[in-house]
Image (spheres, rainbow, N blue to C red):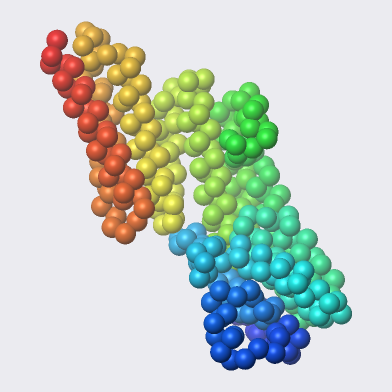
Amino acid sequence: MMHSARLWTAFTISFSLILLLLTGCKTPAKKKVEATYGPTESVLEVVAVLRRHIPDDTYRFPPATDFTGRNVYRSSLLRMESIQRIHANALRSGYMDPVIHFSKGRSLERLRGYDLAALQYRTAEDRDSPLKDQAKKSARVCERIHHAVGIGIQSVNPLGDDANGADEGLHQTPEEVTQALDERVALLSFLYDEEEDSHYQYVISEEIEHADTVRAAWFVSHRYQIPDGQLRALAELQRVVQRHPGSKNKLDHMLQLADLYDDLAHEYVDAVPPANLDFDPALFQDLVDPATQIYEAVASYDGTAQKLEASRRLEAFLAFTLTVDNDRFSH
Protein backbone atom coordinates (compact mmCIF):
# COMPACT_ATOMS: atom_id res chain seq x y z
CA MET A 1 0.00 0.00 0.00
CA MET A 2 2.93 2.35 0.68
CA HIS A 3 4.35 1.54 -2.77
CA SER A 4 1.00 2.36 -4.31
CA ALA A 5 0.89 5.68 -2.45
CA ARG A 6 4.33 6.63 -3.76
CA LEU A 7 3.19 5.84 -7.29
CA TRP A 8 0.17 8.04 -6.84
CA THR A 9 2.30 10.89 -5.53
CA ALA A 10 4.87 10.67 -8.30
CA PHE A 11 2.32 10.38 -11.02
CA THR A 12 -0.06 13.12 -9.90
CA ILE A 13 2.71 15.60 -9.20
CA SER A 14 4.10 15.04 -12.68
CA PHE A 15 0.81 16.30 -14.04
CA SER A 16 0.51 19.36 -11.85
CA LEU A 17 0.60 21.55 -14.96
CA ILE A 18 -2.93 20.39 -15.64
CA LEU A 19 -3.99 23.13 -13.28
CA LEU A 20 -2.91 25.66 -15.85
CA LEU A 21 -4.98 23.97 -18.53
CA LEU A 22 -8.13 23.35 -16.56
CA THR A 23 -8.39 26.56 -14.54
CA GLY A 24 -9.33 29.87 -16.01
CA CYS A 25 -7.74 33.22 -15.32
CA LYS A 26 -9.69 34.15 -12.21
CA THR A 27 -8.90 36.71 -9.58
CA PRO A 28 -7.98 35.43 -6.11
CA ALA A 29 -11.14 36.99 -4.67
CA LYS A 30 -13.39 35.22 -7.17
CA LYS A 31 -11.63 31.89 -6.64
CA LYS A 32 -12.04 32.26 -2.88
CA VAL A 33 -15.78 32.78 -3.25
CA GLU A 34 -16.08 29.75 -5.52
CA ALA A 35 -13.80 27.53 -3.43
CA THR A 36 -16.65 25.98 -1.49
CA TYR A 37 -19.50 25.95 -3.96
CA GLY A 38 -17.81 26.00 -7.34
CA PRO A 39 -17.23 22.95 -9.54
CA THR A 40 -14.07 20.87 -9.32
CA GLU A 41 -11.42 22.50 -11.47
CA SER A 42 -8.80 19.80 -11.93
CA VAL A 43 -8.06 16.12 -11.95
CA LEU A 44 -5.37 16.77 -9.38
CA GLU A 45 -7.93 18.17 -6.95
CA VAL A 46 -10.15 15.09 -7.19
CA VAL A 47 -7.18 12.72 -6.91
CA ALA A 48 -5.91 14.52 -3.81
CA VAL A 49 -9.24 14.05 -2.03
CA LEU A 50 -9.60 10.44 -3.17
CA ARG A 51 -6.04 9.46 -2.18
CA ARG A 52 -6.69 10.68 1.34
CA HIS A 53 -9.59 8.28 1.77
CA ILE A 54 -8.37 5.15 -0.05
CA PRO A 55 -6.88 3.66 3.17
CA ASP A 56 -10.09 4.32 5.15
CA ASP A 57 -11.53 1.36 7.06
CA THR A 58 -15.06 1.47 5.66
CA TYR A 59 -15.93 -1.79 7.38
CA ARG A 60 -15.65 -0.27 10.84
CA PHE A 61 -16.50 3.34 10.00
CA PRO A 62 -18.97 5.01 7.61
CA PRO A 63 -17.49 6.30 4.34
CA ALA A 64 -16.14 9.83 4.52
CA THR A 65 -18.26 12.64 3.08
CA ASP A 66 -17.39 15.80 1.20
CA PHE A 67 -18.61 19.30 2.07
CA THR A 68 -21.98 18.55 0.46
CA GLY A 69 -22.51 15.52 2.70
CA ARG A 70 -22.17 13.09 -0.19
CA ASN A 71 -20.19 9.85 -0.03
CA VAL A 72 -16.64 10.87 -0.97
CA TYR A 73 -16.17 7.91 -3.32
CA ARG A 74 -19.40 8.66 -5.18
CA SER A 75 -18.65 12.37 -5.36
CA SER A 76 -15.11 11.71 -6.63
CA LEU A 77 -16.49 9.49 -9.38
CA LEU A 78 -19.09 12.07 -10.41
CA ARG A 79 -16.57 14.91 -10.40
CA MET A 80 -14.07 12.94 -12.43
CA GLU A 81 -16.75 12.19 -15.02
CA SER A 82 -17.77 15.85 -14.99
CA ILE A 83 -14.18 16.92 -15.65
CA GLN A 84 -13.98 14.51 -18.57
CA ARG A 85 -17.05 16.11 -20.13
CA ILE A 86 -16.32 19.76 -19.40
CA HIS A 87 -12.59 19.67 -20.20
CA ALA A 88 -12.69 17.16 -23.02
CA ASN A 89 -10.56 19.39 -25.28
CA ALA A 90 -7.86 19.94 -22.66
CA LEU A 91 -7.70 16.21 -21.97
CA ARG A 92 -7.98 14.94 -25.54
CA SER A 93 -4.27 14.16 -25.78
CA GLY A 94 -4.86 11.33 -23.31
CA TYR A 95 -1.88 11.97 -21.07
CA MET A 96 -4.17 12.11 -18.02
CA ASP A 97 -6.07 8.94 -18.98
CA PRO A 98 -4.15 6.58 -16.66
CA VAL A 99 -4.79 8.61 -13.52
CA ILE A 100 -8.42 9.29 -14.51
CA HIS A 101 -9.26 5.64 -15.11
CA PHE A 102 -7.30 4.50 -12.06
CA SER A 103 -9.14 7.02 -9.88
CA LYS A 104 -12.51 5.93 -11.23
CA GLY A 105 -11.57 2.34 -10.46
CA ARG A 106 -10.71 3.28 -6.88
CA SER A 107 -14.09 5.00 -6.51
CA LEU A 108 -16.13 2.22 -8.12
CA GLU A 109 -14.68 -0.55 -5.98
CA ARG A 110 -15.90 1.27 -2.85
CA LEU A 111 -19.37 1.53 -4.43
CA ARG A 112 -19.59 -2.24 -5.03
CA GLY A 113 -19.17 -1.78 -8.77
CA TYR A 114 -16.38 -4.34 -9.01
CA ASP A 115 -16.92 -5.26 -12.65
CA LEU A 116 -16.88 -1.59 -13.67
CA ALA A 117 -13.85 -0.94 -11.48
CA ALA A 118 -12.00 -3.81 -13.16
CA LEU A 119 -12.75 -2.31 -16.59
CA GLN A 120 -11.34 1.05 -15.48
CA TYR A 121 -8.21 -0.61 -14.12
CA ARG A 122 -7.74 -2.61 -17.34
CA THR A 123 -7.98 0.62 -19.31
CA ALA A 124 -5.38 2.24 -17.04
CA GLU A 125 -3.20 -0.85 -17.41
CA ASP A 126 -3.20 -0.46 -21.20
CA ARG A 127 -1.54 2.97 -20.86
CA ASP A 128 2.16 3.33 -20.25
CA SER A 129 2.36 4.92 -16.81
CA PRO A 130 3.72 4.36 -13.29
CA LEU A 131 0.24 3.08 -12.37
CA LYS A 132 0.37 0.19 -14.83
CA ASP A 133 1.41 -2.55 -12.40
CA GLN A 134 -0.90 -1.42 -9.61
CA ALA A 135 -3.80 -1.15 -12.07
CA LYS A 136 -3.16 -4.72 -13.23
CA LYS A 137 -3.15 -6.01 -9.65
CA SER A 138 -6.29 -4.08 -8.69
CA ALA A 139 -8.11 -5.32 -11.79
CA ARG A 140 -7.43 -8.93 -10.79
CA VAL A 141 -8.63 -8.34 -7.24
CA CYS A 142 -11.84 -6.65 -8.38
CA GLU A 143 -12.53 -9.43 -10.88
CA ARG A 144 -12.14 -12.04 -8.15
CA ILE A 145 -14.42 -10.12 -5.79
CA HIS A 146 -17.00 -9.73 -8.57
CA HIS A 147 -16.89 -13.47 -9.23
CA ALA A 148 -17.27 -14.32 -5.53
CA VAL A 149 -20.19 -11.98 -4.84
CA GLY A 150 -22.07 -13.46 -7.79
CA ILE A 151 -22.30 -16.83 -6.02
CA GLY A 152 -25.52 -17.60 -4.17
CA ILE A 153 -28.67 -15.57 -3.70
CA GLN A 154 -28.57 -11.81 -4.18
CA SER A 155 -30.31 -8.88 -2.54
CA VAL A 156 -33.47 -7.88 -4.39
CA ASN A 157 -34.44 -4.24 -4.83
CA PRO A 158 -38.07 -4.19 -3.64
CA LEU A 159 -38.76 -1.14 -5.81
CA GLY A 160 -36.92 -2.41 -8.88
CA ASP A 161 -38.54 -3.39 -12.15
CA ASP A 162 -37.74 -7.05 -11.52
CA ALA A 163 -38.92 -7.09 -7.90
CA ASN A 164 -41.95 -9.27 -8.65
CA GLY A 165 -40.88 -12.87 -8.90
CA ALA A 166 -37.22 -11.97 -8.41
CA ASP A 167 -36.76 -14.12 -5.31
CA GLU A 168 -34.24 -16.58 -6.73
CA GLY A 169 -34.08 -18.41 -3.41
CA LEU A 170 -37.82 -19.10 -3.32
CA HIS A 171 -37.50 -22.72 -4.41
CA GLN A 172 -34.18 -23.44 -2.72
CA THR A 173 -33.75 -25.36 0.49
CA PRO A 174 -32.01 -23.80 3.50
CA GLU A 175 -29.08 -26.13 2.90
CA GLU A 176 -28.70 -24.98 -0.72
CA VAL A 177 -28.83 -21.32 0.32
CA THR A 178 -26.27 -21.67 3.09
CA GLN A 179 -23.96 -23.86 1.01
CA ALA A 180 -23.75 -21.32 -1.81
CA LEU A 181 -23.21 -18.39 0.55
CA ASP A 182 -20.61 -20.34 2.50
CA GLU A 183 -18.76 -20.83 -0.78
CA ARG A 184 -18.92 -17.09 -1.42
CA VAL A 185 -17.57 -16.29 2.04
CA ALA A 186 -14.81 -18.90 1.68
CA LEU A 187 -13.57 -17.32 -1.56
CA LEU A 188 -13.69 -13.86 -0.04
CA SER A 189 -11.89 -15.03 3.11
CA PHE A 190 -9.12 -16.58 1.03
CA LEU A 191 -8.71 -13.33 -0.89
CA TYR A 192 -8.76 -11.39 2.39
CA ASP A 193 -5.73 -13.33 3.61
CA GLU A 194 -3.91 -12.65 0.34
CA GLU A 195 -4.51 -8.90 0.57
CA GLU A 196 -2.77 -8.39 3.89
CA ASP A 197 -2.14 -4.72 4.78
CA SER A 198 -4.22 -3.60 1.81
CA HIS A 199 -7.34 -1.46 1.73
CA TYR A 200 -8.99 -4.39 -0.04
CA GLN A 201 -9.28 -6.14 3.32
CA TYR A 202 -11.87 -3.54 4.33
CA VAL A 203 -13.73 -3.96 1.04
CA ILE A 204 -13.73 -7.74 1.40
CA SER A 205 -14.87 -7.56 5.03
CA GLU A 206 -17.86 -5.53 3.90
CA GLU A 207 -18.72 -8.16 1.30
CA ILE A 208 -18.47 -10.97 3.84
CA GLU A 209 -20.80 -9.02 6.11
CA HIS A 210 -23.15 -8.45 3.18
CA ALA A 211 -23.24 -12.19 2.46
CA ASP A 212 -24.11 -12.90 6.10
CA THR A 213 -26.92 -10.32 6.11
CA VAL A 214 -28.34 -11.65 2.82
CA ARG A 215 -28.34 -15.12 4.34
CA ALA A 216 -30.13 -13.93 7.49
CA ALA A 217 -32.65 -11.94 5.45
CA TRP A 218 -33.52 -15.06 3.44
CA PHE A 219 -34.32 -17.01 6.59
CA VAL A 220 -36.40 -14.15 7.99
CA SER A 221 -38.46 -13.80 4.81
CA HIS A 222 -38.95 -17.58 4.46
CA ARG A 223 -39.47 -18.42 8.13
CA TYR A 224 -43.02 -19.66 7.53
CA GLN A 225 -42.00 -21.97 4.70
CA ILE A 226 -39.14 -23.89 6.34
CA PRO A 227 -39.04 -26.23 9.35
CA ASP A 228 -38.37 -24.41 12.63
CA GLY A 229 -38.31 -21.22 10.59
CA GLN A 230 -38.82 -18.81 13.50
CA LEU A 231 -35.95 -20.26 15.53
CA ARG A 232 -33.73 -20.47 12.46
CA ALA A 233 -34.39 -16.83 11.56
CA LEU A 234 -33.52 -15.71 15.09
CA ALA A 235 -30.36 -17.81 15.03
CA GLU A 236 -29.24 -16.31 11.72
CA LEU A 237 -29.73 -12.73 12.91
CA GLN A 238 -27.85 -13.56 16.12
CA ARG A 239 -25.09 -15.02 13.96
CA VAL A 240 -24.70 -11.73 12.09
CA VAL A 241 -24.46 -9.76 15.34
CA GLN A 242 -21.87 -12.17 16.75
CA ARG A 243 -19.74 -12.36 13.60
CA HIS A 244 -19.51 -8.60 13.04
CA PRO A 245 -19.13 -6.87 16.41
CA GLY A 246 -16.68 -4.35 14.94
CA SER A 247 -18.82 -3.36 11.97
CA LYS A 248 -20.19 0.12 11.46
CA ASN A 249 -23.55 -1.62 10.97
CA LYS A 250 -23.49 -3.36 14.36
CA LEU A 251 -26.36 -1.31 15.78
CA ASP A 252 -28.46 -1.92 12.68
CA HIS A 253 -27.88 -5.66 13.03
CA MET A 254 -28.97 -5.48 16.67
CA LEU A 255 -32.10 -3.54 15.73
CA GLN A 256 -33.03 -6.14 13.13
CA LEU A 257 -32.75 -8.86 15.75
CA ALA A 258 -34.85 -6.89 18.24
CA ASP A 259 -37.41 -6.17 15.52
CA LEU A 260 -37.85 -9.88 14.83
CA TYR A 261 -38.49 -10.58 18.51
CA ASP A 262 -40.93 -7.65 18.41
CA ASP A 263 -42.69 -9.04 15.33
CA LEU A 264 -42.90 -12.52 16.82
CA ALA A 265 -44.45 -11.13 20.00
CA HIS A 266 -47.09 -9.28 17.98
CA GLU A 267 -47.74 -12.32 15.79
CA TYR A 268 -48.10 -14.55 18.83
CA VAL A 269 -50.64 -12.21 20.43
CA ASP A 270 -52.57 -11.98 17.15
CA ALA A 271 -52.69 -15.77 16.86
CA VAL A 272 -53.31 -16.45 20.56
CA PRO A 273 -55.09 -13.49 22.20
CA PRO A 274 -54.10 -12.89 25.84
CA ALA A 275 -57.64 -13.62 27.02
CA ASN A 276 -57.43 -17.14 25.58
CA LEU A 277 -56.78 -20.08 27.83
CA ASP A 278 -54.04 -21.19 25.43
CA PHE A 279 -52.04 -17.99 25.91
CA ASP A 280 -48.67 -18.83 27.48
CA PRO A 281 -47.31 -15.88 29.53
CA ALA A 282 -43.89 -17.51 29.87
CA LEU A 283 -43.53 -17.97 26.12
CA PHE A 284 -44.61 -14.39 25.53
CA GLN A 285 -42.10 -13.18 28.11
CA ASP A 286 -39.35 -15.11 26.29
CA LEU A 287 -39.99 -12.82 23.33
CA VAL A 288 -40.45 -9.62 25.33
CA ASP A 289 -37.24 -9.82 27.38
CA PRO A 290 -34.67 -10.06 24.55
CA ALA A 291 -36.47 -7.43 22.46
CA THR A 292 -36.52 -5.02 25.40
CA GLN A 293 -32.89 -5.68 26.33
CA ILE A 294 -31.61 -5.19 22.79
CA TYR A 295 -33.62 -2.00 22.26
CA GLU A 296 -32.26 -0.65 25.55
CA ALA A 297 -28.70 -1.58 24.58
CA VAL A 298 -28.93 0.22 21.23
CA ALA A 299 -30.63 3.22 22.84
CA SER A 300 -27.59 3.63 25.12
CA TYR A 301 -25.30 4.57 22.19
CA ASP A 302 -25.25 8.36 22.31
CA GLY A 303 -24.81 10.36 19.14
CA THR A 304 -26.20 7.75 16.77
CA ALA A 305 -29.31 7.68 14.62
CA GLN A 306 -29.99 4.18 15.91
CA LYS A 307 -30.34 5.57 19.45
CA LEU A 308 -33.43 7.50 18.39
CA GLU A 309 -34.82 4.53 16.45
CA ALA A 310 -34.33 2.15 19.37
CA SER A 311 -35.82 4.59 21.89
CA ARG A 312 -38.98 5.08 19.86
CA ARG A 313 -39.39 1.38 19.12
CA LEU A 314 -38.84 0.53 22.77
CA GLU A 315 -41.57 2.96 23.82
CA ALA A 316 -43.99 1.46 21.30
CA PHE A 317 -43.09 -2.09 22.31
CA LEU A 318 -43.52 -1.42 26.03
CA ALA A 319 -46.90 0.16 25.31
CA PHE A 320 -47.84 -3.01 23.45
CA THR A 321 -46.80 -5.24 26.37
CA LEU A 322 -48.88 -3.12 28.76
CA THR A 323 -51.88 -3.64 26.51
CA VAL A 324 -51.28 -7.38 26.62
CA ASP A 325 -51.15 -7.32 30.43
CA ASN A 326 -54.42 -5.36 30.55
CA ASP A 327 -56.07 -7.90 28.28
CA ARG A 328 -54.87 -10.78 30.45
CA PHE A 329 -56.19 -9.38 33.72
CA SER A 330 -59.34 -7.64 32.51
CA HIS A 331 -61.24 -10.81 31.62
Tell me if residue 192 can be seen. no
Residue 3, position as x, y percentages in the image: 65, 81
In the image, is residue 96 above or below residue 245? below
Viewer-closest of 304 and 38: 38
Examine the image and state in which quarter residue 120 appears.
Answer: bottom right
Left or right: 140 with respect to 32? Answer: right
Quarter of the picture containing the N terminus is: bottom right
* Number of marks drawn: 0
Examine the image and state in which quarter residue 167 appears.
Answer: top right
In the image, is residue 200 above or below residue 239? below
Left or right: 65 with respect to 230? Answer: right
Q: Residue at x 61, y 53 (%)?
A: 188
Viewer-closest of 36 and 46: 36
Left or right: 270 with respect to 48? Answer: left
Q: Residue at x 33, y 17 (%)?
A: 270
Q: Residue at x 69, y 52 (%)?
A: 146
Residue 326, position as x, y percentages in the image: 16, 20
Tell me if residue 122 can be seen. yes
Q: Residue at x 60, y 65 (%)?
A: 75
Residue 217, position as x, y percentages in the image: 50, 36
- Please identify the residue farthest to the right as the structure is shown: 93
Examine the image and state in which quarter residue 279 appears.
Answer: top left
- Please identify the residue farthest to the top as the structure is shown: 277
In the image, is residue 42 above or below residue 76? below
Quarter of the picture containing the C terminus is: top left
